[in-house]
Image (cartoon, rainbow, N blue to C red):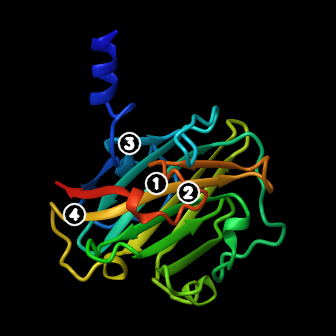
Amino acid sequence: MRLSIFFLTVCGLFADGPGRLESKYTASDFDLTANPNAVQWKSVKPVYAYNDRYGKPVPGHRTELRSRWTKDFLYILYVCPYEKLYMKPDPTAAEETNKLWDWDVAEAFIGSDFQNINRYKEFQVSPQGEWVDLDIDRVTPISQAWKWNSGFQVKARIDAKKKIWYGEMKIPMKAIDTREAVAGNEFRCNLYRIQGPFEPQRKHIAWNAVNAESYHTPEAFGRLVLVR
């Protein structure tokens, strides 16, 4: 039993402390496909989010997360099993959708400032390809934060037969960091999903448990690391 627990801990299933996501380098930027079987994603090792905000399992919603980077962009791919989608009835991908978090979304919170952890960026994509980005400073109202524009791109795809939706983000490095993008750079990061209508039916899936009602708990963020 002790050996089994040790093995699971090493594999990250029962890991203590914030998780680590390695973003794999690629020399060339690529178009978004929202397809984990695309050549740019097939060799990338994933991590998984399968617990709620408090670390309790959310059955049927084990979310696969992968990342890549180039000198100009950070890419994040989500593979999202679902029971039933809850989507905005009048979607638009032509402009950002404020309060997109009221519907089904995948989210990335990313910060490069390790001194002021209350400063970070938030990116969201919906199953319908809607998007919103926010410049978060926890003393700034959300009504102002969402007006920031990072220039990031998204792609989404729904496989209704398999009950999985796929979301992909392409985030400009200059939107999240002032440093040159090089292997070894680290970011504070947490990745989330929201699925379903209002509480208590709503599902919350967090890569790193925040042990709070709000995802905006930066002291619980994990690490995203650029690797070769």
Along the polypeptide, which appears first: circle 4 or circle 2?
A: 4
Name the residue carrying label 2: 167
Name the residue carrying label 1: 77
Q: Are marks 1 and 2 in contact (CB under 8 Å)?
A: yes
Q: Where in the figure is residue 100, as x and y percent of width and height?
A: 68, 70
Q: Is residue 186 left or right of 197 when viewed as pictured?
A: left
Would you place residue 65 above or below residue 174 in this image?
A: above
Q: Tag 3, which secondary structure? A: loop
**Callout 4 amino acid:** Ala
Figure quadrant of residue 87: bottom right
Name the residue carrying label 4: 27
**Callout 1 amino acid:** Leu
Q: Where in the figure is residue 189, as x and y percent of width and height?
A: 38, 61
Name the residue carrying label 3: 46
Q: Is residue 187 left or right of 220 when viewed as pictured?
A: left
Spot the residue most to the top.
1
Q: Mark 4 to mark 3: distance in Å?
A: 20 Å
Q: Is residue 87 left or right of 67 when viewed as pictured?
A: right
* 4 vs 3, front mark: 3
* 4 vs 2, front mark: 2
Along the polypeptide, which appears first: circle 3 or circle 1?
A: 3
